[in-house]
Image: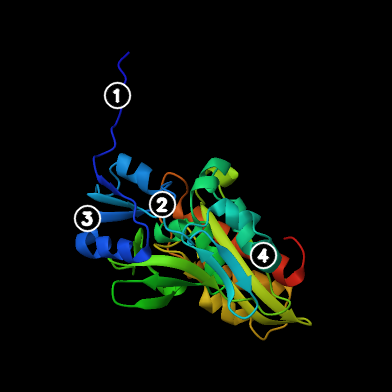
């Protein structure tokens, strides 16, 4: 039996010691360079020739201070570019104030990948099925981005522009994810449909974050993954709930409306019709858990 091994294409490996040094390399090489944080997406993609082979791989691990997770009530949660998925999952601040993020992190890939991969990297990869994206969208997260001339904040809702495509320029780097503190009494959940639980990509992902005042829904956000070219919010479905008395009947109607905001594809993992049906089922279930405190 003959074994064939696919070699990783040759590239120049660079390990800068600072953000300024990183930006200098990116400015010079632009599309020829790729950032390496955890490498759990980049290395397999390059090896399988799914992305153009970079001439330069810029490893961020020698840069101090990018692996932190900090929280205070005023500025919210900050997740650094090198903070691993496991670190997010196990963070006491995340678990206490943003349990939906801890839940999403626990449903991402294998423990080995979570120990290596980063939360920011999962977002920058730009895949529609990214488990971190719906939860972060539901929380109104934004990204702190630095380029050679300026720093800017990009709402996550404006970051994705297509499958594996974002608004990030070739000479920019994401420094951290910023998540505002949810309002008092807000609760959220993330539901993932996958053949092998966390070990497989999401067929459908649904995140809901909501607040109720008495029996009235005062605020709600619904975010969906793997059912459109990018992770998306469902604003029309959200509008049906805000300011309304919460009931199972209303939730059923909202879940049906969420389907209209999807544009899924047929692929080897699921048909578009099945994905739409699961959006209805899972949105109904998530809204029931968040706003009625039960299961559906």
Q: Of the residues tagged 1 and 3, which is closer to the observer?
A: 3
Residue 289 visible, this orientation: yes
Q: Residue at x 59, y 67 (%)?
A: 70
Q: Residue at x 49, y 48 (%)?
A: 201
Q: CA distance from mark 1 to mark 2?
A: 32 Å
Q: Residue at x 46, y 64 (%)?
A: 231
User: Residues at badges 1 and 3 in contact (C-beta under 8 Å)?
Assistant: no
Marker disc for residue 93: 4
User: Residues at badges 1 and 2 in contact (C-beta under 8 Å)?
Assistant: no
Q: CA distance from mark 2 to mark 3?
A: 33 Å
Pointer 1 residue: 4
Local SS, label 1: loop
User: Residues at badges 4 and 2 in contact (C-beta under 8 Å)?
Assistant: no
Where does residue 150 sit, x and y in percent of width and height?
33, 78
Is residue 42 toward the left or the right of residue 210 in the image? left
Pointer 3 residue: 32
């Amino acid at each position: 039996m003959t074994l064939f091994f696919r070699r990783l294409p040759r590239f120049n490996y660079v390990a800068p010691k600072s953000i300024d040094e990183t930006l200098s390399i990116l400015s010079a090489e632009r599309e020829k360079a790729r950032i390496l944080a955890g490498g759990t997406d980049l290395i397999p993609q390059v090896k399988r020739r799914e992305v153009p082979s970079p001439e330069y791989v810029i490893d961020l691990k020698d840069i101090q201070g990018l692996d932190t997770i900090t929280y205070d009530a005023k500025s919210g949660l900050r997740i650094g570019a090198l903070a691993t998925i496991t670190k997010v999952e196990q963070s006491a601040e995340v678990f206490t104030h943003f349990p939906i993020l801890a839940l999403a992190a626990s449903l991402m890939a294998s423990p080995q990948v979570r120990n290596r991969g980063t939360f920011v990297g999962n977002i920058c990869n730009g895949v529609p099925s990214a488990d971190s994206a719906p939860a972060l969208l539901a929380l109104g997260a934004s990204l702190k981005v630095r380029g050679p001339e300026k720093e800017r904040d990009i709402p996550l809702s404006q970051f994705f522009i297509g499958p594996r495509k974002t608004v990030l320029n070739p000479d920019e780097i994401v420094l951290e994810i910023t998540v505002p503190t949810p309002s008092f009494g807000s609760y959220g959940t993330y539901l993932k449909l996958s053949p092998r639980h966390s070990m497989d990509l999401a067929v459908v992902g649904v995140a809901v974050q909501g607040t109720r005042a008495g029996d009235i829904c005062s605020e709600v956000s619904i975010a969906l993954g793997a059912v459109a070219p990018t992770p998306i919010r469902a604003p029309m479905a959200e509008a049906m709930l805000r300011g309304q008395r919460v009931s199972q009947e209303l939730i059923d109607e909202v879940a049906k409306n969420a389907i209209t905001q999807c544009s899924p594809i047929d692929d080897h993992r699921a048909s578009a019709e099945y994905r739409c049906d699961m959006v209805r089922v899972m949105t109904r279930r998530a809204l029931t858990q968040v706003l009625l405190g039960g299961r559906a």
